[in-house]
Amino acid sequence: MSRDERNMTSTAVKHSKEQKPIFCSTNGVGTPFHGRKSRAALLAIISNTILVLLKMCVGFWSGSVSVLSEALHSATDLTASGIAFFSVRVSDTPPDDDHPFGHGKIESLSGLIEAMLIFSAAAYIIHEAVSKLHSHSLDSQKLNAGLTVMALSSVFNIVLSTHLAREAKATESIALKSEARHLRSDVVTSLGVFTGLALVRLTGIPWFDPLLAFLVSALILVSGFQIARDALAPLVDTRLPKEELEIIRTILEVEDRVLGYHKLRTRRSGSQRHADVHVQIDDNCTLIQAHDFTEELEDEIRGSLPSITINIHIEPFHAEIAHQIEKHGLNLPID
């Protein structure tokens, strides 16, 4: 990208910064969404509790393995919602002596626990479907109850998953993102079970019920793998997305006082970002000038990427190049 293009990008970044408030604490770790994330997670708990009770009652009464599988699926949702509620409260706890980088990774751990719950639920559903594949029947009254609860479950979860996805994006919460994805998978499985029960009602063929239970388990497994993948990324310190890296690079490269930079490292921890970089400036800058300039750069990066902790290591440009040539044998030009 050319310097002119980077200037345009930097202008856009600054303009967007002026359009919305920036939340960040003095140490660069912002926690303005603590209550908002907790309320979203609590709403998921209440909704899932209602759905679990409905599906359990209808599932046991009707004997439908697909409804029972959905009841178990929703039970894992409920447990996962409790985990998410706990994790988003803990993740925004300020850094302390034992956790100087904060508690953000608790959200990733909650995502892994959700994934394990999903895998366990899928295994149980497969077991139940196999056991009822050849000895199963449903009467019309019980089918109607199953159809009704599946329809209600779909509507509930469409509304709730949309709300949680919006809150996850706004607050950059991995736990809420996992929960929204979990509920979206519940929408699909509820509609699948509804379809299977409708086919049983129309055709009189009872094995559609366990067949749909198998499909539910397959969809659950896919969701589990996706949640586990997203949760593992911050735990292994995967870098920030390319667009966020580009924002940092743009700020550094359009600034005339930055003569060079290297060792740019980034990572995520829950909804918090961490970055550090070595920046080279004029050798003749005083310590106070270098310090003031570092503060300017860090403030600009924090303004463009809220909830980021940024540490900049300042180096004298020509002296650093001379050091690299003399001590490390690198063939670098000295202007």
Image (tube, rainbow, N blue to C red):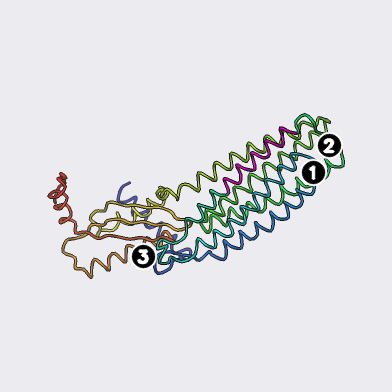
Classify mark 1: helix, strand or loop. helix
The three-letter code of the residue at mark 2 reads Leu
Is 50 magenta? The answer is no
Q: Where residue 172 sits: x, y (%)?
A: 51, 56
- Kind of residue at disc 1: Gly
Q: Is residue 8 left or right of residue 115?
A: left
Q: How many numbered marks, from 0 up?
A: 3
x and y percentages locating residue 285 in the rendered image = 19, 65
In which image quadrant can residue 30 be found? bottom left
Q: Which residue is mark 1?
A: 146
Q: Is residue 203 left or right of residue 184?
A: right
Q: Residues within 10 Å of mark 3 (few under 14, many from 20)?
A: some
Q: Nearer the viewer, residue 176 or 69?
A: 69
Q: Which residue is mark 3?
A: 299
Where are the magenta residues, as a range?
114-131
Closer to viewer: mark 2 or mark 1: 2
Q: Quadrant of residue 196?
A: top right
Question: Disc 2 or disc 3, which is closer to the eye?
Answer: 2
Residue 98 image point, x, y percent = 41, 64
Q: Verify CB contact (< 8 Å) between mark 2 and mark 1.
A: yes
**Looking at the image, is mark 1 or mark 3 earlier in the sequence?**
1
Q: Amino acid at mark 3?
A: Asp
Residue at mark 2 to residue at mark 3: CA–CA distance? 65 Å
Pointer 2 residue: 138
Does 136 sit left or right of 170 as displayed?
A: right
Q: Examine the residues drawn in magenta and state their main secondary structure.
A: helix
Q: CA distance from mark 1 to mark 3?
A: 57 Å
Residue at 51 percent across and 52 percent down: it is 109
Horizontal arrangement in the rendering, residue 259 relative to residue 235 (left or right):
left
